Amino acid sequence: MALVGAGRGLGAVAAVTLIQARAPAEARSRVFAAQDGAAHAAFSVSAFTGVLLVQLAGPHGAFATAAAFALDAAVLAGRTPR
């Protein structure tokens, strides 16, 4: 849990730094609001779909599905141009 918490903190700092560096000053507050809204929407959707997935596939199936999506996300992140 401590490792996950540290990763979340580092990710939050990286996101804020990226927005501060790349968003124009006149739009920065709207960019922060959009990012925060998207994060809250994603959390809400994941909470509702997670319950449904556990009911349909069971705990092991839910974890396997989450692992598959995590692998897909890692592959996509590796392909992202820098």
Image (spheres, rainbow, N blue to C red):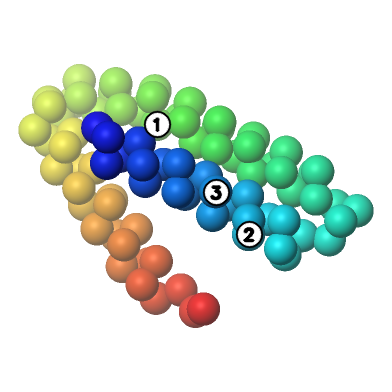
Q: For residue 30, which quarter of the picture?
A: top right
Image-based side of 7 in relation to 45, left or right:
left
N-terminal of the pair, mark 2 or mark 1, is 2
Label 3 vs label 1, nearer the camera: 3
- Compared across the picture, whether 7 is left or right of 66 comes to right
Instruction: Bin the neighbour count of mark 1 within 10 Å (Cα to Cα): few under 14, some 14-19, many 20 and up.
Output: few
Residue at which label 1 appears:
46
Looking at marks 3 and 1 on the same chain, the residue that comes earlier in the sequence is marked by: 3
Do the numbered discs 2 and 1 sit on residues whose CB atoms are within 8 Å?
no
Q: Which residue is drawn at 40% across and 31% down?
A: 46
Query: Disc 2 to disc 1, how far (Cα)?
Result: 25 Å
- Disc 3 target residue: 13
Q: Quick one: SS at disc 3?
A: helix
Q: Which amino acid does label 1 sit on?
A: Ser
> Which residue lies most toward the left here?
60
Q: Residue at x 29, y 23 (%)?
A: 52
Q: In this view, does 7 lie above or below 18?
A: above
Q: Residues within 10 Å of mark 3 (few under 14, many from 20)?
A: few
At 49% from the left edge and 36% from the top edge, which residue is drawn? Answer: 42
Type of residue at label 2? Leu
For mark 2, what is the residue? 18
Kind of residue at disc 3:
Val
- Locate the N terminus and report the quarter of the image it occupies: top left
* Residue 14's disc number: none
Dot placed on the residue nearer the N-terminal end, 2 or 3: 3
SS at mark 2 in the image: helix
**Spatial CA span between label 2 and label 3:** 9 Å
